[in-house]
Image (tube, coloured by chain):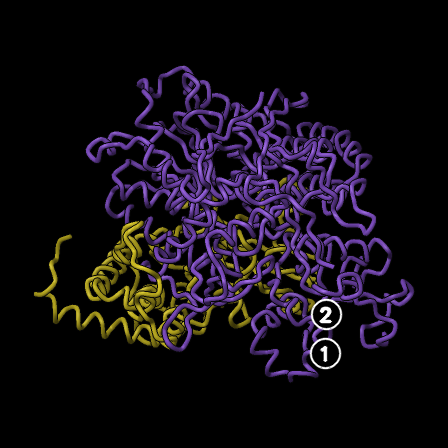
Chain colours: A yellow, B purple
Amino acid sequence: MNLTLHIWRQKDPQASGGFQTYALPNVSEHMSFLEMLDVLNEELQHKGEDPVAFDHDCREGICGSCGMVINGQAHGPRALTTACQLHMRSFSDGDEIWIEPWRAQAFPVIRDLVVDRSAFDRIIQAGGYVSVRTGAAPDANAVLVPKRDADAAFDAATCIGCGACVAACPNASAMLFTAAKLSHLAHLPQGQPERHDRARRMVAQMDAEGFGGCTNHRECEAACPKGISIGHIARLNRDLIAANLKRSDVPEER
Amino acid sequence: MELNGQCPTGPIETRWQQHRFNMKLVNPANKRKYNIIVVGSGLAGASAAATLGELGYNVSCFCYQDSPRRAHSIAAQGGINAAKNYQNDGDSVYRLFYDTVKGGDFRARESNVHRLAEISVSIIDQCVAQGVPFAREYGGLLDNRSFGGAQVSRTFYARGQTGQQLLLGAYQALERQVADGAVKMHSRTEMMDVILVDGQARGIVTRDMVTGKVESHLADAVLLCTGGYGNVFYLSTNAKGCNVMASWRAHRRGAFFANPCYTQIHPTCIPVSGDYQSKLTLMSESLRNDGRVWVPKRAEDIGKSAAQIGEVDRDYYLERKYPSFGNLVPRDIASRSAKEACDDGRGVGPGGLGVYLDFADPIKRLGQPAIAARYGNLFEMYERITGESPYQMPMRIYPAVHYTMGGLWVDYNLMSNIPGLFVLGEANFSDHGANRLGASALMQGLADGYFVIPYTLGNYLAQNKFAPVSASTSEVRAAEADVKERTTQLLSIKGKRTVDSFHRELGKLCWDKCGMARDAAGLKEALVRIPMLREEFWQNLYLSGSGEELNQALEKAGRVADFFEFAELMVRDALHREESCGGHFRTEHQTPEGEAARDDENFTYVGAWEFKGVGVEPELHKETLTFDYVKPSQRSYK
């Protein structure tokens, strides 16, 4: 198939970017979306132009590196599919495709389609863990975990940290990402001791990073390649309220 | 030179325990005076950095990805082994040790493997305490499943995303230390060289991948946790960024590279669909529990669709050749048999490089819902990539490079022959011998990082003196200058060919001559062609842009340049090892039935190579392997 690509090009964080248009002939339907960009980059280099920069690594939909807005949708048109797993058979001959980086104040553009998502790491640093020293753990079967709870924890823990939820949200909120980690740990007995403190700290960090608030558009859930439910956001809100009510019980400083 | 692995002696059950007691300790107040560099943030790197930070060391951790959570350990699907015997099916530390030594085709160190089996038990405890959501039974206990190469169920798993969940556990432990100020994390930062002062590893040179800034970081010890070299074949199941640069730079500075010819080819991957192919996708080995592998009996039938080929015209070659194991033979045997069928002109799909994995029989027997419950997510993934439904027509699969057992040589303490340079996880060579069993890679990465290095590093630090080093030390300045010079050199070639086109050609050459089956003639040919291609690379590479910006083609060029030098070593090692063992199959060395024939008399050793210059023959050093507990025998799966 023959395609017309409109791709956001931006040399560095300070530069003002813009769309550039490229004609790309002979695209195979069996190519992945990123392989299609590889082919474009080979052609650009043959012409002596800079290739399009984009993050990618595993190309199996699990590392969370890739992420781009394709025709207005985070990761493109196919549900539950990252850009690297999207294949060109989702497009037709003659299509025009608009490709942009994630757009969010908290995800500044570094170059072309590459953005800085280190805010996610700082949200995890604020409390997205269980404080357990190496070597200090009891036997793995000493604490029983009902299958239902383990499965629910996994459903949240499957988040790949790609940032599609932020890119899809009109408020550029990171609630789904933050809620997924809180909910994962809140479903397990190991996560209980720090549960409320964790909620307060991670949400505070999310706000400090410049992400917006949640106003229930549910765009995040629709864009999430792992199908994470906004039900986890409801749990986050419950835990946050509980945390604020219990504030006097919990030491603020650690 | 005969290498000494520094393995403890005495009964194997007590070696690690006794060794831990014998090792020197660093007093808690002194730990913060030591600076430790950890390169890589996968299972080995993240677990090491988190644990060392927690102990009080001053840790700096580096990764090329934008976040440590993205290291390629994340893509591991199947599970992690541990000798818990929760199933009461006869497992024990000794049995895991035995299975791993045998699975490695008697080319691993017994002391290391026993330690790994002992530690496996603690790893599961640690991960559960971190909140890793392993699969559970209804009563709330941990669930297990069975995996290749074992007759017990000892594999712990989290759906098909075990690597992801274990890595996130280690990542979160790491981020906790970052928040505490114990670890300084450097993302989007690539290690370009290691700095040696007075023979000790004392730091690394890095390039900031966003600004291009070249910098030195100094320390008292350097830990390389940088994964394997599977991407030398260009097409593999590894992430696109996986590379050999850190190991190769260390090798060039004197670290020995051991057994590079031991590469693992996974039998069930989605075949190549075209020239644009950028990587290969693994389909879980569990599919072989129900799927039946076949190709047409006659080469003239390959153009027909599967449905047009009648039962009598199909060759279920694994069931035919290995009646007792059938479709469940180990990885190396399944892979080689697929290659033989395709070489025979009976491969299916575009290019004839594929075999069928057919679910029609189990669907007829058990019903589609039962098969969907077992493999639904894998079938969906297959359909997403190929556009074909495995419920309607058989899957097409082909083997692909998956894991590399070789790596930098280390002693029992995980230290290379360079004092202060430690190597963990897939980057070292030590535990899997010539073939790794399923669900053992995650176990080894976490064993090294959580439970081995915290002891052995302290022992090294406590016994050595460290001269002051600064940015103005001549060795530091020289290493930095080397890195800058190399970048300038790559950018100044201004040729015509892209870096990917070189990498593809190198990969194809390695795959053809040093892939699933190797012979002396092919290997010798590769030894002529690789240097020629490398020469062309250095004269005809095209790169745009500069070194002072985000330049992904430049990053690739540095990695591919090292793959060119490494490939030659891998081929040389494969040529020198005149036997077949595990993942290394020399067609000249096979039994009359076509199985791998080891030569225990002449090759029961680790082959560790010393760098002597680019294009100069490296020097081979040997570490003799002894088997006091598991006696070498011929593997049979008939």
Between B235 and B425, the one lying in front of the other is B425
Residue B48 percent coordinates (x, y): 37, 43
Question: Residue at image x 73%, y 47%?
Answer: B516
Q: Considering the numbered disc 1 on the image, is that residue within a helix, a strand or a loop? A: helix
Q: Is residue B360 left or right of residue A192?
A: right
Residue B29 percent coordinates (x, y): 19, 33
Q: Is residue B391 above or below residue B106?
A: below
Between A112 and B267, the one lying in front of the other is B267
Other-residue count near label 2 (Cα within 10 Å), few / some / many at <14 / 14–19 / ≥20:
many
Q: Do badges 1 and 2 share one subunit?
A: yes
In the rendered image, is residue B207 in sight? no
Query: Which kind of residue does numbered mark 2 sit on?
Result: Arg
Question: Residue at image x 62%, y 58%?
Answer: B281
Q: Quadrant of the C terminus of chain B?
A: bottom right
User: To which chain does the residue with label 1 belong?
Assistant: B
Q: Is residue B421 above or below residue B446?
A: above
Q: Is residue B296 left or right of residue B107?
A: right
Disc marking residue B292:
2
Q: Quadrant of the N terminus of chain B?
A: top right
Based on the displayed image, in which of its 4 quarters is residue B146 positioned?
A: bottom right
Residue that label 1 marks: B361
Between A110 and B38, the one lying in front of the other is B38
Disc marking residue B242:
none
Question: Residue at image x 53%, y 23%?
Answer: B254
Residue B517 percent coordinates (x, y): 76, 45
Q: Is residue B156 left or right of residue A190?
A: right
Q: Is residue B189 above or below residue B323?
A: above
Of callouts 1 and 2, the N-terminal one: 2
User: To which chain does the residue with label 2 belong?
Assistant: B
Query: Which kind of residue does numbered mark 1 sit on?
Result: Asp
Between B204 and B2, the one lying in front of the other is B2
Q: Is the residue under label 2 in contact with that under label 1 (CB below 8 Å)?
A: yes
